[in-house]
Amino acid sequence: MRQLIARTALALILTTLLVAPALAQVIKVTPMSHDFGDMKQQQTETTRVTVTNEGAGLLQIQNVDADCGCTIPTLNKYSLAPGESTDIIIEFSSKKFSGKVHKVIHIETNDPLNPTVDVMVTATVHTPLIIDPVSQRLGFSQSLQGETMSRLATLTATGDEPLVISAGKARKDLFEVKVINNLDGNPQMAAVEVTVPSTMEPGRQRDNVRITTNIAEFPTLDLEMQAWVVQELTASPARVTYRFRKSFQQSIRIAPFRKGTEFKVTSVECDLPEIKLEVIETIVNEETKILVKGQPLAKTDERAIKSNGRMAGTIKVHTNLEHTPVLEIPITYMIRM
């Protein structure tokens, strides 16, 4: 008897699984791909695909998106009754692409057997000038103050005319810029050599330079340059902040950016007299701690009144390093007025 009941239950489950999809919503997309063909850079084209509900249930289109901001799908109807159809308008921008481009649009629905459908769009983008990097942004990895680093941005003409470029100084004059025509003996290629000079100040630095070419479609282009210059020594934390404290007590770790750099803290000072500092060399030539102690000013103090209770100063750490003789650490605290 138990076996009969088990077989009957299994038969019901199998029947339900087989019948349910037949009664459910079913998505059909036509076409599943589209080739925009030949395009120029910065050109926009559109196409459309049709979504049809071939099932017996209500088809809910839950989401339509693309894998790139250059491709924008637009859908106005998100619920389709059995046999009903709607269009998805796909807008593709060739932007600064070059060569064969492949993009995918994802359609998510409540179709139980096919919840996600992908539509492929392709294009062949032609440009008279290939720029590397395509983003026209040249970035540098972290470098120490006093070091130099160089990178090339290359330009290649796709036509028969030799490429000739020129460039002035960087707008803020932060980077050194050098033009190389006839790169590697190829008259169709040129490059801009960008150098982070040894004199660049610490911090994240950004600048740009305008490049002029003899290509009619690209008379000028702007190259953005980014660098991150760090000092030989780092402070952790890099900034000291107190909010409405009754007293101050903290340690600041001073260590080299690169292991193996020997250094010595020769003295420390702060332009806030209420801040007291003590130097503790925890690991000789490798790590030093600066102990910060003190108490905030009274709210009746003239300095506190003048600054409206917002005190700001700088801790200066003097060292024996040539390129980092002074390491500055901002310090702030607030007083309840």
Image (cartoon, grey):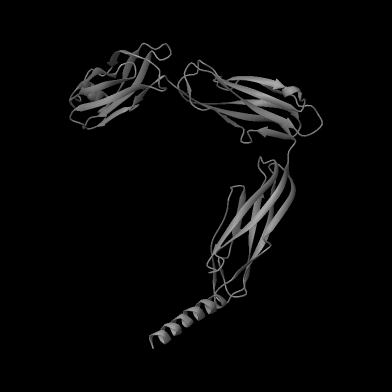
Q: Is residue 14 visible?
A: yes
Q: Is residue 285 left or right of residue 244?
A: right
Q: Is residue 285 above or below residue 11?
A: above
Residue situated in front as seen by the camera: 329 or 324 = 324
Residue in the image at 62% along x and 50% along y: 71
Q: Is residue 168 visible?
A: no
Residue in the image at 71% along x and 49% along y: 123
Q: Is residue 60 above or below residue 44?
A: below
Q: Quadrant of residue 312?
A: top left
Q: Is residue 156 left or right of residue 111?
A: right
Q: Give how far across and how far down residue 143 sits, in percent.
A: 49, 23
Residue in the image at 70% along x and 56% along y: 34
Q: Give how far across and how far down residue 133 sits, in percent.
A: 63, 33
Q: Give how far across and how far down residue 270 sits, in percent.
A: 28, 17
Q: Quadrant of the N terminus?
A: bottom left
Q: Is residue 61 left or right of residue 28?
A: left
Q: Quadrant of residue 128?
A: top right
- Numbered-mark total: 0
Q: Is residue 326 above or below residue 90?
A: above
Q: Quadrant of the C terminus?
A: top left
Q: Give how far across and how far down residue 95 sits, in percent.
A: 65, 42
Q: Is residue 208 left or right of residue 250?
A: right
